[in-house]
Amino acid sequence: MRLTVDHSSTYTYEHGVSYALQQVRKRPISLPSQSILSWDVSIEGAHWETSYTDHHGNLVDLIQLEPDVMSVSVSVKGEVETHDTSGVMGGHSQLVPLWLYQRPTELTMPAKGLRALAGKFSRSPSQDIGVLHELMVEIADKVAYRTNETDSRTTAEDALQQGQGVCQDHAHIFITVARLLGYPARYVSGYLMMTDRVDQDAGHAWAEAWVDGLGWTGFDVSNGISPDARYIQVATGLDYSDAAPIRGLVYGAGAENLVVSIQVQQ
Amino acid sequence: MADGEDVFDEMHGFGEGVRAPYAGYNGWFDKTTPSALLKKSRDAQTFFRRTGITFNVYGKSEADERLIPFDLVPRIIGASEWALLVRGIEQRVKAINAFLYDIYHRQEIVRAGRLPEHLIRENDAFLPKMIGFDPPGGIYTHIVGIDLVRTGPNEFFVLEDNARTPSGVSYMLENRETMLKMFPELFAQMSVQRVSGYPMALRRSLERSAPAQASGRPTVAILTPGIHNSAYFEHAFLADQMGVELVEGHDLRVVDGRVAMRTTQGYETIDVLYRRVDDEYLDPLNFRSESMLGVAGIFDVYRAGGITIANAPGTGIADDKAIYSYMPDIVEFYTGQAPLLKNVPTWRCAEKDSLSYVLEHLEELVVKEVHGSGGYGMLVGPAASKKEISAFRKKLQAKPSNYIAQPTLALSTVPVLTKSGLSPRHVDLRPFVLVSSDGVDVTPGGLTRVAMKKGSLVVNSSQGGGTKDTWVLKEG
């Protein structure tokens, strides 16, 4: 499937920025599930500082906001040929050892609720896929998809307690429980083409668990499926803060407002 | 442990008379009156007080800074003894760098079954963000201090490796300067190798480790946490001696994809940063976000090849005392040779059999925290009271994996000057090592720490230890 992406994020600030650096993870790489045909990231109100590949294999751009700007925008235009791999992304090509993906992070620190949820499942080598699918269904059942109830700092435990959240919260809960069950698991940020619309509400996020014999396998709790040809993977990490499209430090800007426009279409 | 015939004295051996490296000094000493020496000793303390070498002792609020006692009898090492040490140190430091490269890449040593995975996996000093990154020149630890102890003429043991941030080099330099001022005639008689070239050697070594993006003569700077740090004096001293800028985090920012320092003429790019700020405070964008001591984005610039950070982030894992216990295997794995320098035999309390042995022999052993340093939180069995031992036993049982234990070695002694003449005191030795793409350079000298109390084996300055000048004699 050939997908085109047209995505812009515009941040506006209460005051002029005095100093700000942002890490931008918005450049996907070619994988068995996707071939990048063209991809372009442009910025306004900021300039490029440097680029590198991080330990998870993500391409990272460091940008600096211009002094005194009141707004900055990051725009992405790209074209990707995707292939349906039934959510199976395959082998682990990075140097990061798999055990690192079993490590809890601040956002995926299990407490009572998540431990209780994990207690309902057990890892079973012959039925890994079945167990993880059931987990996906259970999380979707317990945590309703609802926007504006959580934010990028909400932990998996808090989202579970609240019983509502967005794709990020779903992914965090899945990752945390999968790790408790003994599966290496990671966070994926990217795009999903919702077939009933051109304008998408938000960037997407889902989870991957390491299944022996299959490799990394994706689970999109919010949509109750494993990723197919409508998905584009952009960045991976232990949690949102590792794979976030944009994260950084902004000094002197006061309150921040974000407007996003995303179109993903065939 | 009592001093006696079983302890090797570096001046008098096991009691068989003055050893060769000390012959020249002994001849001079015999012609000197004790009262004149004692006066010189007081002069030395005044000199230090004036130049301001002091040391913060943690946990002593009433006296924030205090003078480290200086003893003016030099510790003397012969040329051939030193050559032996240098070979061993070079081998070990090369192995440490190869080990660091490996654990941040394919972890072959774990795959080969030579090092248990959990030692990396459960180690807080292991920095995942370093995985897959090749530091400039492939060097992780540019500046190393190897702590050695001696038990006989050719018996040296490595007590610990300081690959993260070896401090104390300013004492080596200042002690020598003081000795040169006080005893010029002695230096005229004996051929002592110079240590004063260290600051420029350090600068050249760092310059050679500049990243590919550097052009022209590389710019080096020292990053300090600031004046409240216990080693601030050393940071300022080294910057001055090297002729480079001493900077703090707020002096630096990212400019044109590089890290640059604010100067009166605008921003100047830094190619190599000798940082004395710990990993977790180095970059609020990538590590602890509340850090006020670091530079936002420096780690991004580093991974992009825009700056050399010395020592590399994540290097501290090599200082871990559980890793230390595997150092003979590590040396062999990466160099293909048997280690030239011995490790002190070490019981890992994480292992059941070792733990029960250690618990049964606490009175004889030295027990240390795996991640500890500076002599804090350790038990010296032979010197501890029954009460201290029983309190320590509880701590050890609560978290065995946090401790290792070692036999109490009969550390060598070197005479110190007391009111009643020369008297032996136990010592250790920290030689300072520089690593660049040109190789390993061991400064002929080092920091000799001395337990100022008779019979004491604890030489840490934080525990009341003092220092001495360390002389390495020239060949012939």
Image (spheres, helix red, strand yellow):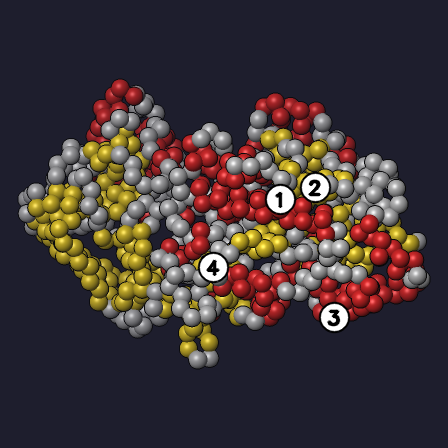
Q: Which residue is mark 2?
A: B156
Q: Of the residues shown, which amino acid type is indicated by label 4?
A: Ser
The kind of secondary structure element at disc 1 is helix
Residue B50's label in the rendered image is 3
Q: Are marks 2 and 4 on the same chain?
A: yes
In the drawing, does residue B140 fall left or right of residue B133? right
Q: Are marks 2 and 1 in contact (CB under 8 Å)?
A: yes
* Residue at image location 62% in from the left, 44% down from the top: B88
User: Whole-Å distance between the Cαs marked 4 and 3?
Assistant: 36 Å
Please tell me whether mark 2 sits on a helix, a strand or a loop. strand
Q: Do the dots labelled 1 and 3 sit on one chain?
A: yes
Which is more foreground, mark 3 or mark 2? Answer: 2
Across and down, in percent, residue A4 comes to: 10, 51
Pinpoint residue B216: horizontal percent, then vertical percent: 42, 70
Q: Tell me the subunit letter for badge 4.
A: B
Q: Which residue is mark 4?
A: B209
Q: Which quadrant of the structure image shows residue B328?
A: top right
